[in-house]
Image: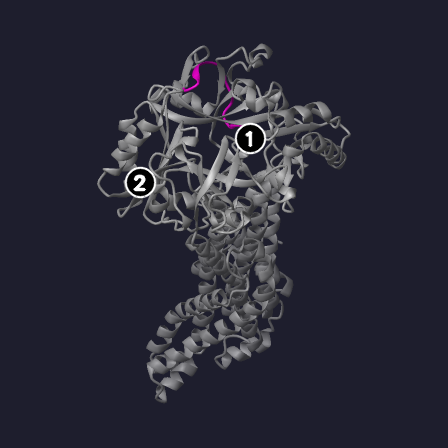
């Protein structure tokens, strides 16, 4: 390969700047998708966690049921794991921590944190950025009043003051002295609260003595480190033996439950992995569409220069040199398009993840590494070779004599080459059909999820959660009268149609569970009780949420702390039926409750609520802790704007308390479904990109076809063909091409649809309507691509066309 060949290839591309720009943009779009997905997969799923000996770190859960649902650990269970597992050389635990904090530039607000065991920071290899970590003596329950804060909390509360050590933070649980600040980028290992952890306490300062003694109360996350030489399979076997022993010793809490072990971070990686590899394949499909389109454009470029190439061959140029020039052109386009696409992919990835509400732990960094760069380069090289194959083959087959003879007769390209060009565009349409079909299935599935009837009113509903500060209502004092006065103030706000208080909130991610027992219950349930979702409410809540009463009644005034209960239909069926459930006495943790009413089933956790929480038990509001309640408000106004107004009003009425979870129910349901939004959003973007690229391919093919048939079109118009007829013929050619491509794509998409089964909600992955919509989109794009060439053909002057020939 000589310098002259390189310069000749670059000059050829410069002379065809429009084609080069179109090719670069196509490759940039495909490369952006692939590079972004490779960076995500490498950074979030494949790269080792940034902790010492991360490959030995494991998470331990309790598991229940055939689906092995993850359940958090109890305090005594973490102690048993620490003492009873020879396969671990360390085992630590962390509990979710939530409290009200006051100070800084944000006033009072609810903060989240972790209460940790003594070896937690050492296990993760953490060193403080400022100050120190807890001393051994500070883990003693008698030694209270110290915290470590995150880098994210250092600014809002203390203005990044380097002298923060020794300063205090006032909370609902007292005043705490700051002893250290952790480095930026670490906000704990409770991944469900990724990015929100702001402080750490010694665990015994937060977990009460009663909770430390109860095997049936969870809430702790466990992290172990395997001993060197101990594999996960051996540790899992040891865990199974420990689970059997604990089930015999504590059947009420451990019976029927297993202990499972998985690599640290697998709990969130498994969810992300499910969609990421599908999207990586879709991104590769988009790049393949781009490569096919560039191949078609370069083949058009080669066909347009057949006479020039024939003259060069007649003057002694070898076929190999012409093939090298075709490869050089493709490589140059791939290099520029790839560089542009790689930069674009890295720039857009954070914005796309934010739009898709994908929340990753702060210790995960998404940056390209050498392996990711090599992977992108390899994929791009393959795309460049594919793009170069057709034009290189055309150059190799150039026969000077036949080309010059065809040119003398007015021909511009061989039929074989033009059929090859059409085949490339047809393959492009087929592959785009597959991508658009998959996108339509995912988007329709997500729309079905959003529109699903949950059994309660969501439109025009908003929630405002209030966390009572000790200055507002001192601990131990009656909070209910204060909250009722506050509710009446909210009810008087303009635009409020109805309001009721409840605990904890809806939609809810993890319902508060309660073990319910009753006389005559099945023997297999009696030991542990039936697990139900527990809510404490006012009687008005059922009217506000429009939950029908099927039998009996709901709570009355004066029953705020009564021994009564309302149950859902599903729970009533377990009690003997909707009518027979009335009057049954249930045993719950804080005493008996007599069933006075049955209401319709709801899914207060959203459409994807776990089946384990399909039973719902409602107790009077006064039987809840009452340190926080949620105001559920019905309004005929825009709930988003209304939420802001009510938030300000409640904040003014209770200035020493904190608000959280303020917003419309529909917004919070969207947050609940954020994991289901990721794949449809990205797949939709990839499909839109493929449609745009395909439109370019159809346009280029038909524009060249019109240019190559100028004399034929001129003769037809001279013989009386109308401009409308000429236009229809060109559009029809595009429609035939699109139809053939769609048919081929449908034949590919139908068997591949099974890969979408795990992502589809409420519909079949082989959805005929989605296929019809995909076909319609491709036909519309083909018609759009055909419009300009058809219009040009219709405007062609017959005499000028014949004279040019």
Q: Position of residue 568 (x, y in %)?
A: 47, 47
Q: Position of residue 323 (x, y in %)?
A: 61, 62
The quadrant the C terminus occupies is: bottom left
What SS does tag 1 mark?
Answer: loop
Tell which circle, 2 or 1, labels the residue nearer the N-terminal end: 1
- Look at the picture and state if 193 lies above or below 709: above
Residue 732 in view (yes/no) = yes
The residue furthest left is 494
Q: Nearer the viewer, residue 609 or 525?
A: 525
Q: Which residue is mark 2?
A: 499
Q: Which residue is mark 1?
A: 219
The quadrant the N terminus occupies is: bottom right
Q: Position of residue 379 (x, y in %)?
A: 60, 51
Estimate how packed mark 2 is, as few (under 14), some (14 to 19) or many (20 or more) residues with alpha carbons within 10 Å.
Answer: many
Q: Nearer the viewer, residue 467 or 167?
A: 467
- Look at the picture and state if 559 lies above or below 479: below
Residue 25 in view (yes/no) = no
Q: Nearer the viewer, residue 461 or 369?
A: 461
Q: Is residue 26 left or right of residue 369?
A: left
Part of the protein shown in magenta: 172-189
Q: CA distance from mark 2 to mark 1?
A: 31 Å
Question: Could you tell me which residue is drawn at 54 percent across and 11 percent down?
Answer: 142
What SS does tag 2 mark?
Answer: strand
């Amino acid at each position: 390969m000589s310098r002259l060949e390189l310069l000749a290839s670059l000059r050829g591309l410069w002379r065809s700047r429009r084609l080069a720009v179109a090719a670069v943009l196509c490759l940039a779009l495909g490369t952006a998708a692939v590079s972004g997905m490779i960076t995500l997969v490498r950074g979030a799923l494949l790269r080792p966690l940034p902790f010492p000996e991360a490959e030995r770190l494991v998470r331990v859960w309790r598991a229940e049921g055939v689906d092995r649902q993850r359940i958090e650990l109890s305090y005594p269970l973490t102690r048993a794991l620490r003492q009873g597992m020879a396969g671990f050389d360390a085992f630590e635990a962390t509990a979710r921590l939530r409290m009200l904090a006051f100070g800084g530039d944000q006033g009072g607000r609810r903060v989240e944190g972790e209460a940790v065991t003594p070896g937690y920071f050492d296990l993760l290899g953490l060193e403080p950025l400022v100050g120190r970590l807890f001393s051994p003596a500070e883990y003693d329950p008698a030694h209270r009043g110290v915290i470590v804060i995150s880098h994210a909390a250092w600014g809002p509360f203390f203005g990044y003051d380097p002298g923060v050590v020794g300063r205090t933070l006032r909370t609902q649980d007292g005043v705490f002295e700051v002893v250290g600040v952790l480095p930026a980028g670490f906000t704990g290992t409770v991944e469900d609260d990724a990015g929100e952890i702001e402080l750490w306490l010694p665990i015994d300062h937060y977990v009460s003595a009663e909770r430390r003694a109860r095997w049936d109360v969870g809430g702790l996350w466990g992290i172990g480190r395997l001993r060197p030489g101990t594999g996960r399979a051996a540790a899992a076997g040891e865990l199974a033996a420990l689970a059997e022993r604990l089930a015999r010793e504590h059947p009420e809490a451990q019976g029927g439950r297993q202990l499972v072990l998985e690599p640290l971070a697998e709990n969130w990686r498994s969810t992300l992995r499910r969609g990421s590899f599908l999207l990586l394949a879709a991104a590769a499909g988009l790049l393949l569409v781009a490569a096919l389109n560039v191949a078609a454009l370069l083949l058009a470029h080669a066909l347009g220069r057949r006479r020039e190439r024939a003259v060069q061959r007649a003057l002694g140029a070898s076929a190999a040199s012409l093939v090298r020039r075709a490869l050089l052109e493709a490589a140059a386009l791939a290099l520029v398009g790839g560089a542009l696409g790689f930069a674009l992919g890295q720039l857009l990835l954070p914005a796309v993840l934010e739009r898709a509400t994908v929340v990753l732990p702060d210790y995960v960094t998404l940056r390209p590494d050498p392996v990711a760069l090599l992977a992108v380069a390899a994929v791009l090289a393959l795309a460049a070779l594919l793009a170069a194959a057709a034009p290189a083959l055309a150059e190799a087959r150039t026969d000077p004599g036949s080309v010059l003879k065809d040119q003398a007769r007015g021909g511009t390209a061989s039929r074989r080459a033009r059929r090859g060009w059409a085949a490339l565009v047809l393959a492009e349409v087929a592959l785009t059909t597959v991508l658009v079909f998959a996108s339509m299935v995912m988007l329709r599935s997500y729309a079905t999820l959003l529109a699903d009837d949950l059994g309660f009113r969501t439109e025009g509903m908003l929630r405002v959660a209030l966390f009572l500060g000790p200055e507002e209502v001192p601990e131990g004092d009656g909070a209910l009268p204060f909250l009722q006065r506050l509710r009446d103030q909210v009810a008087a706000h303009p635009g409020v149609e109805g309001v009721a208080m409840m605990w904890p909130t809806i939609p809810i991610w993890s319902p508060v569970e309660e073990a319910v027992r009753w006389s005559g219950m099945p023997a297999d349930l009696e030991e542990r009780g039936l697990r139900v979702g527990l809510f404490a409410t006012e009687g008005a809540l059922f009217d506000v949420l429009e939950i029908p009463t099927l039998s009996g009644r709901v709570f009355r005034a004066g029953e705020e702390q009564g021994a009564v209960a309302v149950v859902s239909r599903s729970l009533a069926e377990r009690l003997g039926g909707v009518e027979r459930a009335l009057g049954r006495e249930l045993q719950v943790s804080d005493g008996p409750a007599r069933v006075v009413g049955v209401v319709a089933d709801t899914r207060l956790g959203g459409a994807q609520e776990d089946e384990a929480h399909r039973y719902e038990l409602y107790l009077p509001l006064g039987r809840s802790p009452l340190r926080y309640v949620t105001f559920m408000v019905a309004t005929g106004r825009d709930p988003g704007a209304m939420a802001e107004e009510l938030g300000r009003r409640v904040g003014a009425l209770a200035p020493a308390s904190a608000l959280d979870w303020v917003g419309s129910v529909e917004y919070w349901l969207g947050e609940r479904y954020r994991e289901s939004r990721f794949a449809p959003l990205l797949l939709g973007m990839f499909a839109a990109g493929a449609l745009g690229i395909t439109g370019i391919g159809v346009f280029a093919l038909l524009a060249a076809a019109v240019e190559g048939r100028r004399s034929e079109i001129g003769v037809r118009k001279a013989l009386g063909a109308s401009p409308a007829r000429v236009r229809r013929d060109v559009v029809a050619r595009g429609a035939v091409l699109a139809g053939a491509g769609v048919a081929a794509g449908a034949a590919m998409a139908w068997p591949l649809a099974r890969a979408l089964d795990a992502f589809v909600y409420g519909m079949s992955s082989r959805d005929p309507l989605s296929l019809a919509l995909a076909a319609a989109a491709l036909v519309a794009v083909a018609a759009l691509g055909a419009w300009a060439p058809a219009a040009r053909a219709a405007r062609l002057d017959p005499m000028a066309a014949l004279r040019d020939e």
